[in-house]
Amino acid sequence: MKRFSLTATAVLLCLFLIVPAVMAAKKPILIRFSHVVAENTPKGWAAKEFAARVDQELKGKVVVRVFANSQLYDDNQAVEALSAGFIEMIAPSSAKFVGSVPQLQIFDQPFLFPSVKACHDTIDGPIGQEIFGMLSKRGLKAIAFWDNGFKQFSNNIRPLIKPEDFKGVKFRIMSSDVLEAQMKTLTAVGLKLPFSEVYNALEQGVVDGQENTASNIYSKKFHEVQKYMTLSDHGYIGYLVTTSDAFWKKLPADIRTALERILKEVTLADRDKAMELNVKQLALIKEYAQRSGKLNIHTLTGAEKKVMQKALEPVHKMTPDIIPVSWIEQIYNMK
Ligand code: LMR
């Protein structure tokens, strides 16, 4: 009896100690990737592609679950949720780091970057190095820089062709002080709202207009509640794929290397995809405008663009306490 109970105890001990250990060892690392846009956008596509590639290459070791459309967090909550460990990965536009690394608002500057390549060169160069250092001081680790593209204006008051046309128009803007300065300079009003609230705000007249990429406009149907659209390419939207230092350091080194490699490959593919989606979705907006007769689209001519550029140039040096003037000069020199 005594022998039996000793054996039973040993078996039970094994079950208690070994089985959970084996199960725990097999449990894949979970990466909850939260973002705010639709799936048929550059970021929506890249996040899904990243998840699929991780599934293919790190099966059983890492699982990426993507939560799109602000399902989990609005953009003004995402950085905090990441720092608190509620999610493991985010890719907010640079404007959304206003509370942690406001210097990232350099990417919100109107007509500063002559091309998407200039944005890449900035993040890959000395300015990017400084920014990564600032992120690290806030316990954040940026692993990749994904494109969306250039922004266009839309509104319900009048066609926006000259700086004077912006007078008094109320725009939804991202949570960026640079964008607020941009609107003030145009004598317009900028209202900071999360991306998830833009459609309703436009539909209900809380704001008259907004600025975003063709892909973000099309995928959220903003064009269906706007009368005028101006193709201006006046500012850029790109994303920092970010995790927390705490989460990143806990990962085994080989997993970190594999994730970095996969993200690098997805980033390269995203650059073409972002351009492709913006072109395709702008064509669909134009098709809608023609079919419905409810949206008037104006493309700024070269001369009109120059007037807008000149009007907005003072914004570049309006926030020297946030964005060093030397950074602005470096980007001018890139041109
Ligand atoms: C916006 O808020 O308009 C954009 O930052 C949304 C996004 O993530 O592209």
Image (spheres, helix red, strand yellow):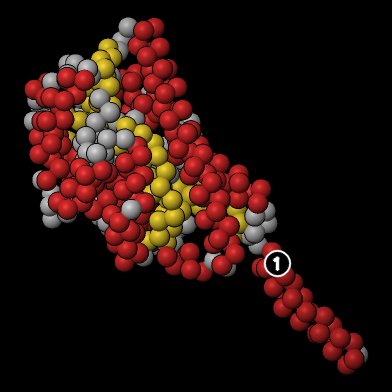
- Give the left or right position of residue 173, taking residue 319 as reference: right
The location of residue 218, given as percent across then percent down, is 39, 24
Q: Closest to the observer: 40 or 306?
A: 306
Quadrant of the image occupied by residue 135? bottom left
- Quickly name the residue at label 1: 23
Residue at figure coordinates x 42%, y 43% from the top left: 146
The location of residue 216, given as percent across then percent down, is 38, 31
The location of residue 39, given as percent across then percent down, is 49, 34
Q: What type is the residue that disc 1 sits on?
A: Met
Quadrant of the image occupied by residue 22? bottom right
Q: Closest to the observer: 125 or 38?
A: 125
The location of residue 119, given as percent across then percent down, is 32, 43
Within 10 Å of disc 1 (Cα), the crowding (few <14, some 14-19, many 20+) is few
The quarter of the image holding the C terminus is: top left
Residue at figure coordinates x 48%, y 44% from the top left: 267
Q: Closest to the observer: 30 or 119?
A: 119
